[in-house]
């Protein structure tokens, strides 16, 4: 049994490492040192909750590495307002981090068990502005669009136009895209963390370095 106080010390240390690696946004750093990551991993792994690595969460899926969670959150340019959509709820950890930085968080997961578990974890923490949906997230969540930001936490073959359509003007889509090395893409290839900003109907695309995510599976993602 690890005491809550020890976990807090580990969490604050993790937030300092993240800051050393270039994350500057004060709200993001605060969220990283507030959200109890150990609640989002299986009990047997709580000891490793604050190592800077991805960990299994069942169903062949993973909770993302803390640094990439912080990076993707910072890339949304959060200012405490507006709605954010997350595709790939997984453990719910990224959604919990987003919940203190946006008014409302909408999160979509295709695997029912993961979504239900994430909902329980988040409710048990007393977080009430996260809304869950079990569906193929490559369709987005049209009912609450447009969003100020959309974060996709699974690797896509390309930018799904469905998601771009659900961004408000000036909105940002943060998404890992498979790097096209040889013209023949597959879901095991490297990915590039990509930000697409929608501005007056034009899309501006920037790259933010390599990353590694499980595949985005669905109608506008990978097939299997
Ligand atoms: N954000 C998560 C990590 C997600 S891992 C966290 O903080 O723990 C990626 C998740 O994306 C997996 O749970 C996977 O099932 C989900 N996923 C993959 N394709 C999807 C799709 N089309 N729609 C919704 N979720 C999807």
Image: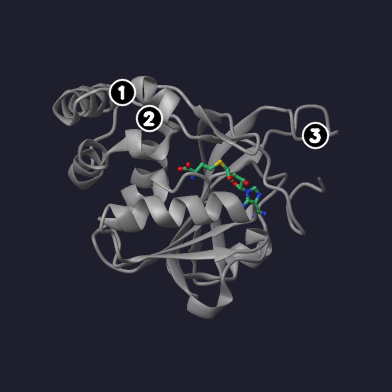
On the rendered structure, is 120 left or right of 138? left
Mark 2 surroundings within 10 Å by alpha-carbon count, few (fewer than 14), some (14 through 19), many (20 or more): many
> Which residue corresponds to the image point at 54% horizontal and 45% vertical from the top-left?
153
Observer-nearest residue: 11 or 149?
A: 11
Number of numbered discs visible in the structure rendering: 3
> Could you tell me how far apart the alpha carbons at marks 2 and 3 are, in whole angstroms?
25 Å
Q: Name the residue under label 3.
A: 186
In the image, residue 217 lies at what x, y percent?
Answer: 72, 49
Out of 33 and 183, give the one closest to the viewer: 33
Residue 61 quadrant:
top right
Q: Is residue 196 among what the camera can see?
A: no
Chain-order first, disc 1 or disc 3: 1
Q: What percent of the width, then of the height, locates residue 214?
A: 64, 36
Residue 67, disc: 2
Q: Can residue 74 be seen in this view?
A: yes
Q: Name the residue under label 1.
A: 21
């Amino acid at each position: 049994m690890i005491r809550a106080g020890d976990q807090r010390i580990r969490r604050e240390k993790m937030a300092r490492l993240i800051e050393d690696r270039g994350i500057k946004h004060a709200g993001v750093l605060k969220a990283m040192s507030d959200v109890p990551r150990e609640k989002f991993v299986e009990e047997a792994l709580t000891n490793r909750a604050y190592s800077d690595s991805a960990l299994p969460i069942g169903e062949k899926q993973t909770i993302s590495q803390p640094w990439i969670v912080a990076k993707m959150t910072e890339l949304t340019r959060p200012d405490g307002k507006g709605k954010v959509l997350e595709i790939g709820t997984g453990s719910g950890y990224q959604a919990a981090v987003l919940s203190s930085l946006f008014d409302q968080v909408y999160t979509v997961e295709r695997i029912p068990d993961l979504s239900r578990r994430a909902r329980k974890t988040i409710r048990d923490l007393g977080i009430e502005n996260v809304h869950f949906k079990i569906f193929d997230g490559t369709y987005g969540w049209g009912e609450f669009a447009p969003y100020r930001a959309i974060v996709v936490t699974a690797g896509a073959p390309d930018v799904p136009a469905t998601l771009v359509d659900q961004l408000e003007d000036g909105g940002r889509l943060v998404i890992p895209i498979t790097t096209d090395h040889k013209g023949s893409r597959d879901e095991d290839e490297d990915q590039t963390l990509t930000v697409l900003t929608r501005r007056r109907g034009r899309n501006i695309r920037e790259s933010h370095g390599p990353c590694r995510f499980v595949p985005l599976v669905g109608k506008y993602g990978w097939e299997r």
